[in-house]
Amino acid sequence: MIITRTPFRVSFAGGGSDIASFYEKHEGCVLSTAINKYMYISVHPSFSGKETVLKYSKTEAVTDINQIEHKYFKKMLQILDVKGVEIVSTADVPAGTGLGSSSSFTVGTLNALYAYKGKYVSKERLASEACDVEIKYLHNPIGKQDQYAAAYGGLNFYQFRKDGSVTVDPVIMNDDARAKLERNLMMFYTGQLHSASAILKEQSGNITAGAKEENQLKMCKLAHELRNELQNNNIDAMGEILHENWMLKKTLASGISNPAIDEAYNLAVEAGAVGGKLLGAGGGGFLLFYVPEEKQQQVKNAIGLPQMPMAFDRQGTAVIYVGDKPDFI
């Protein structure tokens, strides 16, 4: 049996500039961190050795992998030519909550399947191939930041080049500043799920339109600014930049926010949050805020939503268990 653990991510600034319609024209950049909430994928031979069994929100058992309904599993098993296995996926957080779960699933599954075949694959290759699966083969209108965050882990500044390549630069901070940053970030679950594809499809079409394109450029500039502030250990700049980024992001597509999200955001700011944003494409999921420690209880009381504690993940996708393949007589 092989088990992989792959982190989800929190994006701070620049989101949307990782979409091809933008970075092929301007080059994009995102500052994000992987967090200690994970997707787990296990792979082992199926009992019969003939069936391929998949267990996620439902169970599939097929003798021909081309009959698989789950489009992600189907495409990855086809590409790697793996069959006669049982694969189980389990996650700490539901899909559709703005933490890049589909990409964590894709990276983690590729990592597990390669390990099952006895092959080491670099983080760069896992991220790149996950992008191919989601964007090239499955035609999802999404960007590239989630796949790289899931593969690499850590707090990083990502640059998306016009030729489609991606550079990954760690954000260097002293330990005290990093610890303070983690302590001052609060995440709250809105209770609403969202469809990232629908929002990103509209956003991608809007990005080349006048003011919306200009706002996306400003968001990319904010990512550069945030990297500089963090590397100078000016942690308190995070709140103001999150707020400015969120105000710009809301202009990019119609479904990014809604009255309930706006109300929760305003309540948090009134109670002491310096700034924040909705994570992911928008429309639901988790709200993130930068809140000084002395104001955190006030914010929690005011917003009235469930809080999810989190910390940064520095490892990225990892094989956490390797067992012997069973021998049946």
Image (tube, grey):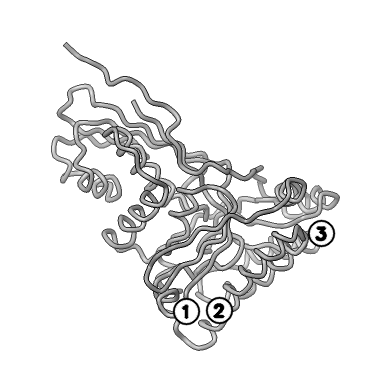
Q: Are marks 1 and 2 in contact (CB under 8 Å)?
A: yes
Question: Which residue type carries mark 2?
Answer: Leu
Residue shown at 50% from the left, 44% from the top: 316
Relative placement, left or right, of 289 versus 328 is right
Residue shown at 81% from the left, 59% from the top: 271
Give the residue number, with chain letter if any, for mark 2: 217
Q: Earlier in the sequence, mark 1 or mark 3?
A: 1
Q: Position of residue 91 (x, y in %)?
A: 47, 39
Q: Is residue 305 above or below residue 11?
A: above
Q: Nearer the viewer, mark 3 or mark 2?
A: 2
Q: In which quadrant is the N terminus drawn?
A: top left
Q: Is residue 145 above or below residue 68?
A: below
Circle number at residue 277 = none
Relative placement, left or right, of 94 versus 179 is left
Q: Position of residue 313 (x, y in %)?
A: 58, 43
Residue shown at 40% from the left, 65% from the top: 165
Residue nearer the viewer, 95 or 171? 171
Q: Determine whether the residue tagged by mark 1 lies in a helix, strand or loop.
A: helix
Q: Earlier in the sequence, mark 1 or mark 2?
A: 1
Q: Position of residue 309 (x, y in %)?
A: 66, 42
Give the residue number, with chain letter if any, for mark 3: 272
Toward the top, the furthest residue is: 329
Give the residue number, with chain letter if any, for mark 1: 26
Label 3 to label 2: alpha-carbon separation = 29 Å
Q: Quadrant of residue 237?
A: bottom right
Residue nearer the viewer, 121 or 83? 121
Q: Nearer the viewer, mark 1 or mark 3?
A: 1
| Mark 3: few/some/many CA within 10 Å (<14, 14-19, 20+) | many
Q: In which quadrant is the C terminus drawn?
A: top left
